[in-house]
Structures are given as structure tokens and as C-alpha cells.
Image (cartoon, rainbow, N blue to C red):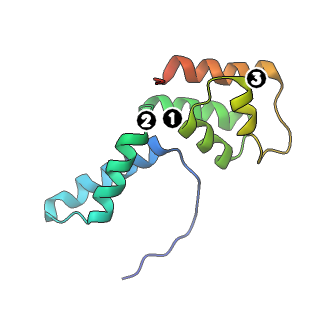
Amino acid sequence: MPYEITEFHDIPNALAKRILKEYIERVSSYDIIPELIRSTMDYLDRTSKCDDKAVEYIYEMLKNLKLKDTTISMILNILPRNLDELRILLTFEETIPDDSILNKILDAINQNCQQE
């Protein structure tokens, strides 16, 4: 039976990793995990810089600021380190929040996510 896509949302890598991990746990009893799933999981392991709980917390914070899913995902995947980097990621937004809000976003990222 083919699957039907009923909705589409941009999500950060850390949340995609959690969803994929849950999927792998469900299908692992069949002893068949497709190579595409393994490759995707490997990619997400290498690129996720924040654990899913911290990402979920920041995601909700950004959602409350009325940012678009695309913008939120880019912020949480890239983890900007300063205002200039953060402003670049706001290109999909109709209005850019003022600097005090942007600094709160950076503080939340710095407090909850490791940075290299």
C-alpha cells in the first residue's frame, strides 16, 4: 500500500533524527533497515549539534515568536553565533524582530546547544 503525504513541515535535523530513530526501533525487529535510512541516520548523527530536548525547547520559543518553520529549522541546524549570522537566516520572514529578541534567541542557543 503506497503512502500518501498529507502534510509537510520543515523540521530541524535533531527532530528528524529522533523521528528516524523511533522508526528504526520499530522496524529493527524485522532485521531489515534500508541503506537509505542508515545513511540518513549517519548524516543526522554527524550534523545534529543539539540534543532533541534542547531543540524542542528552542523550537517552541521560536514558534511563539511567530517565525516560519523554514526559518526555525535553518536557525536550529546552523546555530548562528552572532546577530549578523542570525539576521541572514531571517530572509523568509516578512518582518525582522528587533535586536533584543534576536539576542534572546542567541542566548537560548548558546545556553542549550554545544557549539564547535
The percent position of residue 33, horizontal first and vertical second, equals 22, 63
What's under tag 3, amino acid-wise?
Ile
Which residue is label 2 attached to? 52
| Residue 93, horizontal then vertical, whole percent | 79, 44
Query: How far separated are the C-alphas under marks 3 and 1?
Result: 18 Å
Residue to which mark 1 is pinned? 56
Which residue, as the protein is rendered here, is positioned at the far bottom? 1
Residue at the image point whose x is 55% and y is 69% from the top: 6
Q: What kind of element bears circle 3?
A: helix
Read off the residue under disc 3: 101
Label 2 neighbour load within 10 Å: few <14, some 14-19, many 20+ = some
Q: Nearer the viewer, residue 111 or 29?
A: 111
Circles 1 and 2: CB distance less than 8 Å?
yes
Q: Which mark is residue 68?
A: none
Quadrant of res 87 = top right
Tell which tag, 3 or 1, sits nearer the viewer: 3
Location of residue 107 with respect to 89 vertically, above or below: above
Say if 28 sits above or below 1 in the image.
Answer: above
Q: Residue at x 26, y 55 (%)?
A: 24
Q: CA distance from mark 1 to mark 2?
A: 6 Å
Along the line of sight, which residue is nearer the eye, 82 or 99? 82
Marks 3 and 2, how far apart at CA: 23 Å
| Residue type beneath disc 1 | Glu
Looking at the rendered structure, the kind of residue marked 2 is Asp
Q: Residue at x 39, y 46 (%)?
A: 44
SS for dot 2: helix
